[in-house]
Image: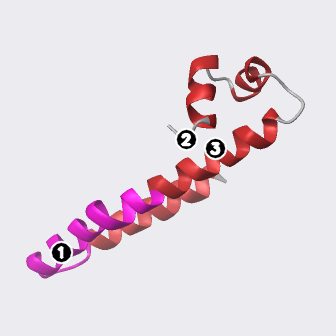
Amino acid sequence: MSDQIATHIDAALAALGEISDPLERERAARRMLDTLLPDAARKAKGVRQEVVLKLREGRTLREVAAILDLTYARVDQIAKGR
């Protein structure tokens, strides 16, 4: 699945390069950087928190950290929405 996401991101970046008008290309790139990517990052952060909290049911944070191959501290941060 992450390969599919990377493919879509690559396609979006390639589409930027295909915009012939430099001003339009800059506006599209700015929208991607200023709006789309931050929004996607917020949504992805929420997904990570949701998964950690779901995995947390019946497990310790250390067990969740081992499952996700993350540190205990990072899993704790994700669980707290940081």
Residue bearing the label numbered 3: 49
Binning the other alpha carbons within 10 Å of mark 3 as few (below 14), some (14 to 19) or many (20 upward) gives: many
Looking at the image, is mark 2 or mark 1 nearer the viewer? Answer: 2
Give the answer, above or below, for where 67 lies relative to 28.
above
Q: What SS does tag 1 mark?
A: helix
Percent coordinates x, y for residue 28 in the rendering: 24, 74
Residue 58: image x %, image y %? 90, 31
Q: Nearer the viewer, residue 76 or 21?
A: 76
Residue placed under numbered mark 1 in the picture:
27
SS at badge 3: helix
Residue drawn at (79%, 20%) of the image: 63
- Whether the residues at callouts 2 and 3 have beta carbons within 8 Å, the answer is yes
| Residue in the image at 51% along x and 54% along y | 6
Which image quadrant for residue 80? top right
Residue type (three-letter) at the residue carrying disc 2: Gly
Residue ID at (54%, 48%): 45
- Few, some or many C-alpha atoms within 10 Å of disc 2 (few <14, some 14-19, many ≥20)? few
Pointer 3 or 1: first along the chain: 1
Locate residue 52 relative to residue 12 in the image: left or right.
Answer: right
Q: Residue furthest left?
A: 23
In magenta segment, residue 22: yes
Distance from label 3 to label 1 (Cα)?
32 Å
| Span of residues in magenta | 17-40
Name which of mark 2 and mark 1 comes first in the sequence.
1
